[in-house]
Amino acid sequence: MKSVAIISKPSKPELTGILPELLAWFRHRGYEIYLDRETGQYTDGAEVVPREQLGARHPDFALVLGGDGTLLSAARAVGHTGVPILAVNLGSLGFLTEVPLNELQATLEAIDACHCPTEQRALLDCSLHRGDSVVAQHFALNDAVVSKSAIARLLDFDLLIDGTFVFNCKADGVIIATPTGSTAYSLSAGGPVLMPSVTSFVVTPVCPHSLTYRPLVVPDKATIELCMGTSDEEAYLSIDGQVGVPLQRGDRLICRRASHTVKLLRMKRTFFDVLRNKLKWGQPLGRLSS
């Protein structure tokens, strides 16, 4: 039997009108349906499963209804199991959730007919070391961000690449971004846009004390290490903007490419089509569009 997991953004009352027709579409085509708790509160008649357990049901794909944040949460929940994810934009900007609601049915029909390709997206494997212990470990599809928690203080950290000292920096923060995350916070902080297929990560200082510190692109085979010199409880680690850990002086954040990827179901739009639409870039000259 075919199966689908549906993951929704909390506090989206419009789901009350969307879900009945959507569930009827899946049932008509013989799908077994699993809902996370956020989705289950808007409908009944389908099995409700905690989000972190959806991957163990091995659905054919996961349908995400929300924005980029919901997709990032879904990627942490099911991405490691190899379940492909289709993201439908119920939010605002949505670099990752490229499918608008009015194209949902056509997209589902393409998936049902096996005509929807997948893209492999790299993740960061982030481990926080305190002394001889690993006190936290998380995967990030977008980025790992170290930021200050006190308004008047600058972060003080060393950056090492593959064990080699690069620089000591004082800044409001630092972002370690994947190619997927290069269009998120790193872009706002002046970092470059990377195509998803580029095998690199970006280290972007946020408002550094000296203008000579620039974003740094490193191979995704590299080990990126931040050593914190900031006083206790004045710095904070954030994973994809959703998981947070307070930092202490002497903590070491080590980021490597994860051994698994996240599979995203994509329409036939190119990466540049999405960029041009989301960033309001100009259209081609008449002689190029004919």
Image (cartoon, rainbow, N blue to C red):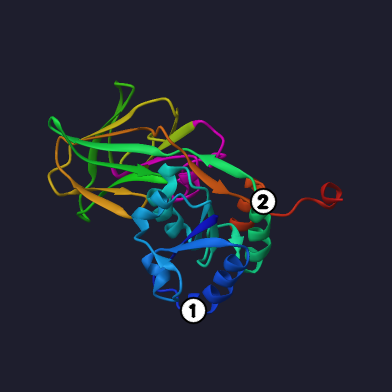
The residue lying toward the viewer, choosing from 49 and 278, is 49
Q: Residue 117 occupies which quadrant of the picture?
A: top right
Q: Amino acid at mark 2?
A: Asp
Q: Magenta stretch: residue 196 in it?
A: yes
> Which residue is pictured at 52% across the width and 66% down the height?
92
| Side of 240 where 114 appears, left or right | right
253 relative to 187 in the view: left or right: left
Label 1 amino acid?
Thr
x and y, in percent, of residue 185 in the image? 42, 50
Residue at 35 percent of width and 54 percent of height: 53
Give the left or right position of residue 143, taking residue 200 as reference. Answer: left
Q: Is residue 288 visible?
A: yes
Disc 1 crowd, CA 10 A, few/some/many (<14, 14-19, 20+): few
Against 267, residue 211 (above or below) is: above
Query: What is the number of callouts on the image?
Result: 2
Q: Position of residue 251 (x, y in %)?
A: 18, 36
Q: Nearer the viewer, residue 250 or 29?
A: 29
Looking at the rendered image, the quarter that the N terminus falls into is bottom right
Residue on which disc 1 sits: 16
Please state which of residues 120 and 192 is positioned toward the viewer in this rendering.
120
Magenta range is 171-199
Return the residue at label 2.
273
- Under circle 2, the secondary element is helix
Residue 201: horizontal and vertical position, in percent? 44, 34
Q: Earlier in the sequence, mark 2 or mark 1?
A: 1
| Residue at (49, 75) in percent of width and height | 15
Q: Nearer the viewer, residue 173 or 271?
A: 271
Residue 108 colored magenta? Answer: no
Say if 274 sits above or below 43 in the image: above
- Residue at 59% of width from left, 57% of height from top? 98
Tell me the element at label 1.
helix
